[in-house]
Image (tube, rainbow, N blue to C red):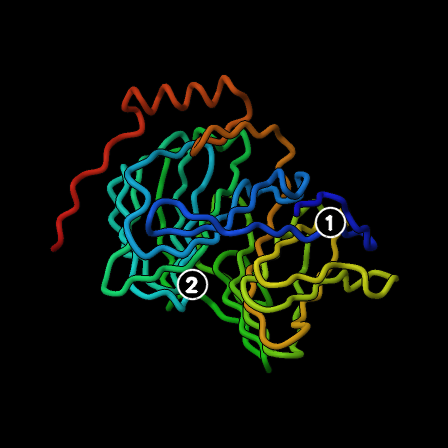
Amino acid sequence: MISTQEVTSGDLHFSHPVTCAPHAVGAYCNIRQFRHSDFGGAMSPLVLVDDYVMTGPTFELHPHAGLSAVTVLFEESQGWMSSHDSVHNDHRIEPGDLHWTLAGKGIVHTQQPEGDHTRLHGLQLFVNLPHHLKRIEPATMLLHARDVPIVEGIGIRLRVLAGRLDGKISPLITPEPILIVDGWLDAGARTVLPLPSGWNLWLYARFGNLAAQDLDAAESGSGAMLSSGEAVAVSADKAGTVELRSSAGAVKFVAIAGQTINEPIVQMGPFVMNSREEAEQAIADYHAGKFGTVMPFQET
């Protein structure tokens, strides 16, 4: 059941937890999909998040425009993912890696599972671009797991995939500032995430039970309690701090924070624009071959 009502806590606003049941996409993939409309706009700059488990080929060659398509591959994945695109980058995405496809004015790509006994578990993110960046030149970037900075403490492990946290800075260069954390908390452990004014935070409990609250709120207990597979969005009127803790046993979670994009969203499949006319133009450009082509990949 989806609810977009908010719980006000100091200068932070928590949506109600959103639960999405997994569903099959083809024969080899199951996804749990969260859309920006599920959170009443508080998910921005995210447009969509898919929590996927993939065991075989699923997505053929396809285009994107007006956004960044980001692939996070969790460390427990088996096998790897091959990525090929029309800016002529061939990438091997290994467990723990992050792959960023800056689609901009248009890109074509394919990402396919590879290896023996493949079971890829991760997130696919549609990160919106503000209007002035929607026609930027496309590019793709790969962040290897070995280069991901890690915040560690007693019962805490936070992989800083993008942005800055506790003095750790990801080397990934993104079109707009964003924080992406792949986190783990042991039973009873807690950590805090700063949330700048005008930013939104999307929290997802991918395993276990996660409690989140406004650290600066006068009213104790305000915030959200998440069970496995649930997500919540937190909006900041003023700069604040969100405390996260495991409420029962260990918890694995993902936290994504970025500045709100207060612009219209018109999504037509893999295209995200500000108007129907812009989306239709992107579709026309794709069919006219303006997004380029993917060259045949040859193993060296």
Q: Which mark is residue 236?
A: 1
Give the x, y percent position of residue 71. 41, 51
Residue 114 or residue 297, whichever sits in front: 114
Give the x, y percent position of residue 78. 32, 66
Q: Could you tell me the amino acid type at mark 2?
A: Phe
Q: Could you tell me the amino acid type at mark 1?
A: Ala
Q: Residue at x 38, y 58 (%)?
A: 143
Residue 284 to residue 51: above or below: above
Q: Residue at x 29, y 62 (%)?
A: 118
Q: Residue at x 56, y 42 (%)?
A: 35
* Tag 2 secondary structure: loop
Instruction: Tell me the CA gap for discs 1 and 2.
Output: 28 Å
Quarter occupied by residue 158: bottom right
Give the x, y percent position of residue 224. 73, 59
Residue 74 or residue 102, whichever sits in front: 74
Left or right of 25: which side holds 220?
right
Q: Residue furthest top?
A: 277
Q: Quadrant of the C terminus?
A: bottom left
Give the x, y percent position of residue 10. 83, 54
Label 2 belongs to which residue?
Answer: 74
Give yes or no for contact between labels 1 and 2 (Cβ–Cβ under 8 Å): no
